[in-house]
């Protein structure tokens, strides 16, 4: 259910840059239909790319609910429900379960920098409190908190912790975690740039930013990699390599929202403290999109 190219979907907003830029559910429906048509295998709603940090808890739950309603079971939905407060993460995870998601994605607590023991207890309590499949999410570049492989391996023994999104780009971790967890434990990349090699090394797929704007190519690349067809996967990935990099020319999701607006899929809306893409980067990103063959 959760293999291949999984999109970390943006949260569309009305035009503008403000603390309370309004959400755009019509555009969300358009995006979801686009992904189903293009072969994306699952959707992550309200993750980092979905601006989880600046949505209120009510909005967070509403976006998840709308995503489930729009998909109508045609594609699995994973809800981003992590927080640096264990009680808040439990609340969001309960909300996601109530509206019918297939799994939840829980980022490591950010800013407060828990120990490895604290991380284990945090995830254990959430898993025991809310009986829904849960995926760990390790992205130290964002959180200043690195969940080490030994902690992931320990958590993998909990029945409803079904996998991890590993966004360090450290391919050595794939082998270490794969060899020490059960066969069904999911290993998902959180780093588009190294995804091809991550899957070829034993990973199951990616939760992708690039898939927002190049869903078909990401889907096809992942399928080839999962089948061990390295040459075919590499051929597609070569067309995406520059895009993997340039979608982080400013902080995510600034560039990907600009690119989606350029494709006519969303309005130019984002919430402070994120801003719209600086004009000085527009030509560079547009040229990259042309190079990737998506415009």
Image: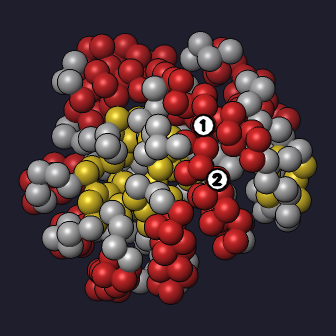
Residue 54, placed above or below residue 86: above
Total label count? 2
Q: Quadrant of residue 138?
A: bottom left
Work out whether residue 118 or residue 10 is closer to the camera in this orientation and state it.
Answer: 10
Which part of the image, by quadrant, shows the N terminus? Answer: top left
Q: Position of residue 184 (x, y in %)?
A: 16, 52
Q: Position of residue 59 (x, y in %)?
A: 71, 65
Which residue is located at x 74 percent, y 30 percent?
Answer: 265
Which residue is located at x 27 percent, y 26 percent?
Answer: 225
The residue at which mark 1 appears reads as: 32
User: Which one is in front in this view, the residue at disc 1 or the one at disc 2?
Assistant: 2
Q: Is residue 55 left or right of residue 146?
A: right
Q: Position of residue 49 (x, y in %)?
A: 60, 51
Which residue is located at x 55 percent, y 31 percent?
Answer: 35
Which scheme is used to colour this image of the protein?
secondary structure
Q: What is the crowding at mark 1: few (fewer than 14 residues within 10 Å), some, or many (at least 20)?
A: many
Q: Position of residue 195 (x, y in %)?
A: 36, 36
Residue 10, placed above or below residue 151: above
Question: Which structural element holds mark 2?
Answer: helix
Work out whether residue 193 or residue 280 is closer to the camera in this orientation and state it.
Answer: 193
| Residue 132 shows in this picture | yes
Q: What is the crowding at mark 2: few (fewer than 14 residues within 10 Å), some, or many (at least 20)?
A: some
Cα separation between marks 1 and 2? 11 Å
Q: Is residue 213 left or right of residue 6?
A: right
Q: Quadrant of residue 51?
A: bottom right
Residue 66: assigned label: 2
Earlier in the chain: of badge 1 and badge 2, it is: 1
């Amino acid at each position: 259910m959760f293999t291949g190219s999984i999109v970390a979907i943006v949260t569309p907003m009305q035009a503008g840059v403000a603390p309370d830029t309004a959400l755009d559910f019509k555009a969300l429906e358009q995006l979801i239909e686009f992904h189903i048509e293009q072969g994306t295998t699952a959707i992550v709603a309200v993750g980092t790319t979905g601006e989880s940090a600046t949505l209120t808890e009510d909005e967070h739950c509403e976006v998840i609910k709308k995503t489930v309603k729009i998909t109508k079971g045609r594609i699995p939905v994973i809800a981003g429900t992590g927080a640096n407060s264990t009680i808040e993460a439990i609340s969001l995870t309960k909300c996601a379960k109530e509206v019918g998601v297939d799994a939840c994605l829980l980022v490591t607590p950010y800013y407060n920098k828990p120990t490895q023991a604290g991380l284990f207890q945090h995830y254990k309590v959430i898993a025991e409190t809310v009986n829904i499949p849960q995926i760990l999410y390790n992205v130290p570049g964002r959180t200043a908190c690195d969940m080490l492989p030994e902690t992931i391996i320990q958590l993998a023994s909990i029945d409803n912790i079904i996998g991890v999104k590993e966004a360090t780009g450290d391919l050595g971790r794939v082998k270490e975690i794969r060899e020490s967890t059960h066969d069904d434990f999911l290993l998902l990349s959180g780093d588009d740039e190294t995804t091809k090699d991550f899957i070829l090394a034993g990973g199951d797929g990616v939760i992708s930013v690039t898939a927002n704007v190049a869903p078909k190519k990401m889907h096809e690349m992942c399928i080839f990699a999962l089948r061990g067809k390295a040459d075919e996967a590499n051929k597609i990935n070569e067309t995406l390599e520059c895009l993997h990099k340039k979608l982080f020319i400013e902080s995510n999701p600034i560039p990907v929202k600009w690119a989606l607006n350029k494709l006519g899929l969303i309005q130019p809306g984002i919430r402070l403290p994120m801003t719209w893409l600086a004009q000085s980067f527009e030509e560079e990103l547009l040229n990259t999109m042309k190079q990737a063959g998506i415009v």
